[in-house]
């Protein structure tokens, strides 16, 4: 890892950076445009910089400014970021090149809230006019401060397990009957936080085994007998769920603590890396510039039952239709020289066996819903289109043909949006929780179900792979759809009924 990559790794783990508090974007003319200002960042507080302004030069303190027009955006960002409390002078101009001025800012710590754990309280309508209240926790990564990124003030350090526990406690206060833990876009992170997070749902016991090329495996266990959430739990995974998220899903599956739902398997990254900063070695200590770090693969993960998560990943209890299920090179299996999956001895643990007795009924009910769902029918169409394009080894270079193909894709998406808008089914009521508002009394106002038409990025579950690279028209309003999450919630409600846990009904 070079210095920029190492710094980005620290930012991702610490969920904070030292800078001016602005999202930047490079335009086609090579200008560095200010896309968005963070409300509490130095740039916004100065009141001298506006969104859509562009930065043309950067100076460190009293040093000579460096022209950044035409510079690679990552390099420009490295110049703008710097140590907390240091001065950066920006030469800024308006979007039309007017009103050029020099602005001095003092860099500060900027939290990255978009990657923090967040949640929803959802009132799901029932056929009898009453609703069931469930919680959804969206966890993008397993974050924790690393190396020299720890803050001297413990309150400023963010830990996944603590944040999720806070959201769960809020959901308990608001009367949720069950929880969905969404790990679909979680690429991993801190092993320690994966163990602690698993401990929020089990009393005590081994979570994961870690083994190097020599010696006996090391067992990482939850030593805390307390449980934050002992109620019904569904874990949602995808082919993008990797490393630490696979550890959590595997442990909760081995214990029989949660119903695992999602793509045909998770990513399959079951290896442990050690990060070694080169500046700590004497041979590099005198270098003026940070030489970065070396990352070594040193061990493999094994489930409590002894099977590795490497290569094969975690197979969910209920597999839902997804384009990613048929993408051959997805996950660890698609990488050259990937280590194989193997097995060691199981460690001793006590399963709670809360899922197996109900799995047959859950699969049957889910299968019936998926078979009759219009949104999953769209996903099956996308699967067929993807396989068709995979078989076709040619792409037309004729502009009229390409425009026709794009128009067909756009028309298909608009037809789907129109059909969704015409549906008369009762909508769930959704209350969004963040780490900023979870401590406030009561719930925030419910959010609207409609949203701008989602671009084809896989977040809606309707077109995770777009072979033609077309985009839907985002001007027309259409329902914000996530059929995979909707089905996970429906599975949770089924689970609640089978457990006899639906004891509180709402009629709002």
Image (cartoon, rainbow, N blue to C red):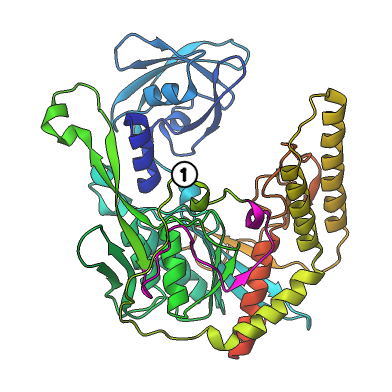
Helix, strand, or loop for circle 1?
loop
Q: Residue at x 45, y 26 (%)?
A: 74
Left or right for 497, reference 349: right
Q: Residue at x 29, y 31 (%)?
A: 83
* Image quadrant where residue 489 sits: bottom right
Report whether residue 37 is seen: yes
Residue at the left extreme of this rendering: 282
Report whether residue 508 is seen: no
Task: Name the residue tied to disc 1.
Answer: 336
Is 441 one of the magenta-colored residues?
no
Q: Nearer the viewer, residue 169 or 373?
A: 373
State the image coordinates of residue 281 (x, y, percent, origin top left).
14, 34
Q: Which quarter of the rendered picture does the C terminus lie within?
A: bottom right
Left or right for 55, reference 326: left
**Range of the magenta residues?**
303-327
Q: Nearer the viewer, residue 263 or 105?
A: 263
State the image coordinates of residue 426 (x, y, percent, origin top left).
79, 69
Q: Residue at x 87, y 49 (%)?
A: 415
Circle 1: is it few (<14), some (14-19), or many (20+) Cα within 10 Å? few
Is 306 one of the magenta-colored residues?
yes
* Location of residue 161 with respect to 93 vertically, above or below: below
């Amino acid at each position: 890892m070079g210095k920029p990559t190492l710094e980005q790794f620290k930012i991702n783990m610490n969920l904070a950076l030292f800078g001016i508090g602005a999202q930047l974007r490079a335009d086609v003319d090579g200008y560095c445009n200010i896309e968005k200002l963070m409300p509490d960042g130095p740039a916004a507080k100065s009141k001298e910089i506006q969104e859509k302004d562009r930065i043309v030069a950067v100076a460190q303190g009293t040093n000579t400014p460096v022209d950044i027009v035409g510079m690679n955006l990552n390099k420009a960002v490295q110049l703008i970021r710097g140590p907390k409390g240091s001065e950066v002078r920006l030469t800024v101009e308006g979007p039309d090149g007017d009103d050029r001025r020099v602005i001095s800012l003092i860099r500060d710590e900027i939290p990255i809230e978009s990657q923090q754990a967040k949640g929803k309280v959802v009132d799901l309508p029932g056929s009898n006019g009453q609703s069931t209240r469930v919680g959804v926790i969206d966890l993008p990564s397993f974050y924790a401060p690393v190396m020299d990124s720890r803050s001297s003030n413990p309150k400023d350090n963010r830990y996944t397990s603590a944040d999720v526990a806070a959201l769960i406690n809020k959901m308990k206060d608001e009367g949720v009957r069950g929880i969905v833990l969404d790990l679909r876009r979680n690429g991993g992170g801190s092993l320690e936080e994966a163990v602690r997070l698993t401990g929020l749902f089990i009393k005590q016991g081994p979570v994961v085994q870690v083994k190097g090329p020599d010696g006996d495996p090391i067992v990482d266990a939850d030593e805390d007998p307390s449980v934050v959430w002992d109620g019904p739990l569904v874990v949602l995974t995808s082919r993008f769920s990797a490393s630490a998220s696979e550890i959590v899903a595997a442990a909760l599956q081995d214990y029989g603590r949660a119903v695992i739902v999602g793509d045909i398997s998770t990513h399959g990254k079951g290896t442990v890396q050690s990060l070694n900063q080169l500046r700590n070695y004497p041979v590099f200590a005198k270098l003026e510039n940070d030489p970065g770090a070396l990352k070594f693969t040193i061990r493999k993960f094994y489930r409590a039952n002894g099977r590795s998560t490497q290569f094969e990943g975690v197979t969910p209890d209920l597999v839902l239709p997804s384009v990613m299920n048929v993408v051959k090179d997805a996950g660890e299996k698609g990488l050259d020289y990937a280590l194989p999956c193997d097995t060691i001895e199981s460690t001793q643990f006590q399963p709670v066996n809360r899922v197996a007795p109900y799995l047959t009924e859950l699969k049957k009910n889910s299968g019936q819903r998926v078979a009759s769902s219009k949104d999953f029918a769209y996903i099956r169409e996308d699967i067929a289109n993807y396989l068709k394009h995979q078989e076709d080894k040619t792409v037309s270079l004729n502009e009229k043909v390409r425009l026709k193909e794009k128009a067909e894709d756009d028309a298909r998406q608009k037809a789907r949006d129109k059909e969704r808008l015409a549906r008369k089914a009762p909508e769930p009521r959704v209350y969004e929780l963040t780490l900023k508002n979870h401590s406030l009394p009561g719930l925030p106002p419910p959010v609207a179900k409609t949203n701008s038409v989602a671009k084809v990025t896989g977040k809606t579950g309707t077109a995770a792979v777009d072979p033609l690279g077309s985009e839907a028209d985002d001007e027309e309003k259409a329902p914000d759809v996530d059929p995979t999450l909707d089905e996970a919630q429906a599975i949770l409600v089924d689970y609640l009924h089978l457990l006899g846990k639906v004891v509180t009904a709402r009629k709002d």
